[in-house]
Image (tube, rainbow, N blue to C red):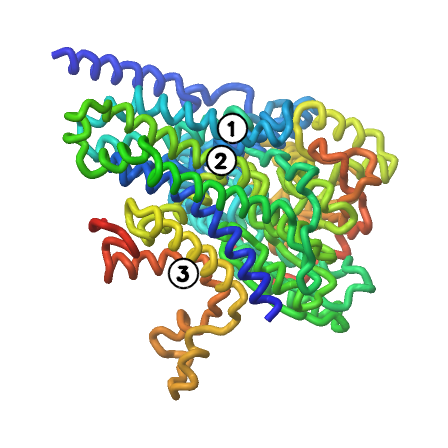
Amino acid sequence: MEVILVSLLNGLVYGMLLFMLASGLTLIFSMMGVLNFAHASIYMLGAYFAFETSRFLGFWPALIIAPALCGLLGAAIEVWGLRRVHQNGHIAELLFTFGLVFIIGRSVQMGWGMLPEPYRVPALLDFPLFTLYGLQFPAYRAFMLLVSAGMLGAIWLLLKRTRIGLIIQAALTHPGMVAALGHNVPQVFTIVFAGGCLLAGLAGVIGGNYQSTEPGMADAMGPIVFVVVVFGGLGSLAGCFIASIIMGMVSTFAVVIDASVADALRPFGITLRADDLLTEILTVPVARIGALLPLLMMVLILFFRPRGLMGTRDT
Amino acid sequence: MKYQRILAAAFATLLGVAAWSPSSRAADNTIKIGYVDPFSGPFAATGNNFLKVFNYVLEIVNAEGGPLGKKYELVTFDSKLQPAEALIALKSITDQNLPFVMHCVGSNVGAAMVDAVSKHNARNPDNRLIYMNCGALATELTNEQCDFWQFRFTANVDQRAVARIKTLPKSVTSVYVLNQDYLFGQSVQKATLKYLAQYRPDVKIVADELVPFGKVQDFSPYIAKIKASGAQSLVTSNYDRDLNLLMKAGNDAGLDIRYDSYLAHQPGGPTSTGPAGDNRLTSIMEFHDNVPAEEHNEAGQKFVDGFRSRADFNFIPLDYLTMFRMVTAAINKAGSTDALKVALALENMKVTDLMGDENIMRGEDHQLLSPLHEAIFTRGAKLDAEHTGLGWKTEAKLSAADLTLPTTCKMKRPAQ
């Protein structure tokens, strides 16, 4: 019981971090049709920018400055990079962002070195919020929940309740009509791409000290974010939210299950002998393969529901 | 037309570079060592840190006179931590007739290397080379898979496990064993369980777990499990990100436990552990910055100060200095870099290391017998690690004799 409650909380925190990352990615995709491979790299840059800013100005200014820098970088990438390669089609865009992954990764290695940076939780939030069955729940995790929930609310308001949101949504489905009505569609694209990068940067600021700030962090988060976006349905913010929470919970709960698939089959009278074809796979405890479950779920959903949980078009 | 001209120019440049390559300048005053390790990809940090260590070690060894009055020079090759890439590198090393190939990271790469070097030497008796293993730790490489042409200049998994278990405090009666789910982690897991049963039958193993290698983003659920198990100590060979995130999650949750690790001293470990590791993190290492002060050794202090002034991490692998001193002595004894003569000279060679302890290259299996330290990460240390304010302090030192384990190696020796 105690493990379940603790895992529930941790799964929520991790899920919300995933959502912060994935929401930016899904916004960019639904708007521009660009699958931004470099999204996790921007996340990493957000963490490094925040680390540098917090060295001189403290954590709180970093919370504003680092995402803003990432947003500006995103705008620059869109205006001088993506827009130029756009005329060569989606493959060119894909390869362009793929190249960015290497450029950003290598720049970070050259700029900050290979070792992790001592980017730590601010002193103001470095205390246990409450104790649950002898385990402390750090205040910083609660703060992460707060920031991501705030972000979720802000995006929703922006998209559904403001004029710019209206134009963005319209440009998503009818770019030609929106342009004909006198709106600058390329500029809307720039805003969306910058906004997505800003969200990734914000995730980096609060994820960088929750995990560790090092050159490998982009590679570590990249795949799982794609899994979330595909699972939730490309282009659906609500699907993205649900998928993030599911993935957070699955990753967290899988760890505490020491049973294997074979154990689950036993009550049905199926027992495996050592030399059966799949024995090796089926007797592995779920905890050991927990990290693979999200990928497995993605494969299954692509099989049975290619548009994802709440997607509006096929992947 | 224009393209053709550009192509021709590029080709000419390539030819120029090839003509200038090291192989055509063989007759100079250096002894070249082909060094294969990951210099790109996710493990690039490890390779590049080792390179810093070797550059420092070689400066010292070369200043001491070098073998036959010559200087060592490293020729680096990127293994990308892939056996296939390492074998391609080995091919160019043998093409250039380099007498030594050195490789540190990854037992999977090490196993491929042992095999390939052995085959190459059997087929090309005029162009043989020695494999200097400086970090492929799987014990099998000097047991079942042992080979005459491989020399392992660092303690293997079993030796480290013996050191780990023997130095576990008497007050610890329950441990949680946690390792990464791949070759090295499983090898440590096996050795840890074996020596726990042998040396500390009083210790209860409350859990024995493998975690996916480099895949876990949040270790909090593991911490909840560890808490529920009531273990006093977490014995783990996790390293890099998998150790940092584990300790971070433990500290966040206020888990009161000892972390008895195998590799927490690796570059970056102290930085990400930080103050939270104070007096609860221990590791098994060859050397650390405070050893010379603890043993009142001036030469050692000079060595440490020299490295501290140029790198931002602690110098740990003292056996790499021992390795080059041994190889130098062997080349001098052999009078040439002929692989067979050097290999025979290396067998059963005894060398006194920087701290005055005797190291032996065992002839039976070509495994170095050298001392190890068990040290705790603490504020009370004289020299800190990675500017954290905390440093390593030796709690126990195990001599080469303490760590001499039987071997099952049945070596096939070349005809002399």
Identity of the residue furthest to the bottom in this view: A269
Q: Which mark is residue A10?
A: none
Residue at 47% x, 26% y: name it. Answer: A68
In this figure, which residue is indicated by the disc labeled 1?
Answer: A66
In this figure, which residue is indicated by the disc labeled 2?
Answer: A202
- Parent chain of label 2: A
- Alpha-carbon span between mark 1 and mark 2: 7 Å
Of badges 2 and 3, nearer the viewer stands: 2
In this figure, which residue is indicated by the disc labeled 3?
Answer: A293
Residue A127 on image: x %, y %: 70, 46
Q: Nearer the viewer, residue B239 or A22?
A: A22
Q: Is residue B75 visible?
A: no
* Picture quadrant of residue A6: bottom right
The three-letter code of the residue at mark 2 reads Leu
- Parent chain of label 3: A
- Alpha-carbon span between mark 3 and mark 1: 33 Å
- Alpha-carbon span between mark 2 and mark 3: 27 Å
Residue at 80% x, 60% y: name it. Answer: B169
Q: Is residue A73 visible?
A: yes
Residue at 71% x, 44% y: name it. Answer: B286
Q: Nearer the viewer, residue B330 or A292?
A: A292
The three-letter code of the residue at mark 3 reads Leu
Q: Relative to residue A87, is residue A9 depicted above or below? A: below
The three-letter code of the residue at mark 1 reads Ala
Q: Give the structural element (helix, strand or loop) at label 1.
A: helix
- Parent chain of label 1: A
Q: Give the structural element (helix, strand or loop) at label 3.
A: helix
Residue A38 on image: x %, y %: 37, 34
